[in-house]
Image (spheres, rainbow, N blue to C red):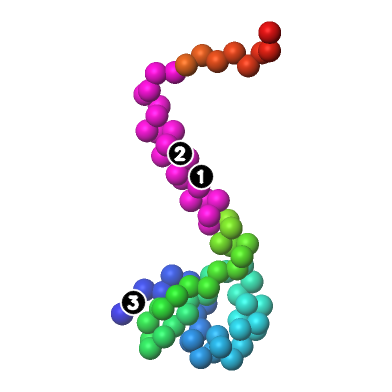
Amino acid sequence: MDRILADMAVSVTELKRNFAGVLREAGDAPVAVINHNRPEAYLLSARHYEQLMDYVEDLEDAELIRQRQNEPSISVNLELD
């Protein structure tokens, strides 16, 4: 059996019938969309998705910092003469 990675799950049929109600009930929490008793997709609010993308960007930035931490540094003067 597939693992469902959300506290709320709805069938594709229920989502089609009551999309606005499902969104309202879920709030910012993810919703597993079930098709033939298996998770087919996850529905996220725009706010939740944006937070997730910000987090992924932060992880990518942290990895880039780790990769470059041993490279030689260059001194830069930001003062205008």
Judge whether residue 27 can be spotted in this image. yes
| Farthest residue, direction front | 81
Cβ atoms at labels 2 and 1 below 8 Å apart: yes
On the picture, is 3 further left or further right than 44? Answer: left
Name the residue tied to disc 1. 58
- Looking at the picture, does residue 81 appear above or below residue 3? above
| Distance in Å between CA atoms under marks 2 and 1 | 6 Å
On the picture, is 31 further left or further right than 27? Answer: left
Judge whether residue 25 can be spotted in this image. no
Kind of residue at badge 3: Asp
Quadrant, the C terminus: top right
Which of discs 1 and 3 lies nearer the camera? The answer is 1
- Residue 2's disc is 3
Instruction: Determine which quarter of the picture holds residue 19.
Output: bottom right
Q: Mark 3 or mark 1, which is nearer the start of the sequence?
A: 3
| Farthest residue, direction top | 81
Residue 67 at what x, y percent from top left?
Answer: 37, 33
Kind of residue at badge 1: Asp
How crowded pointer 1 is (Cα within 10 Å; few <14, some 14-19, many 20+) is rated as few
Residue 63 at what x, y percent from top left?
Answer: 41, 39
Name the residue tied to disc 2. 62
| Distance in Å between CA atoms under marks 2 and 3 | 32 Å
Q: Residue at x 45, y 39 (%)?
A: 62
Residue 39 at what x, y percent from top left?
Answer: 40, 78
Q: Which residues are magenta?
A: 52-73
- Looking at the picture, does residue 50 appear above or below residue 8? above
Cβ atoms at labels 1 and 3 below 8 Å apart: no
Secondary structure category for the residue under label 1: helix
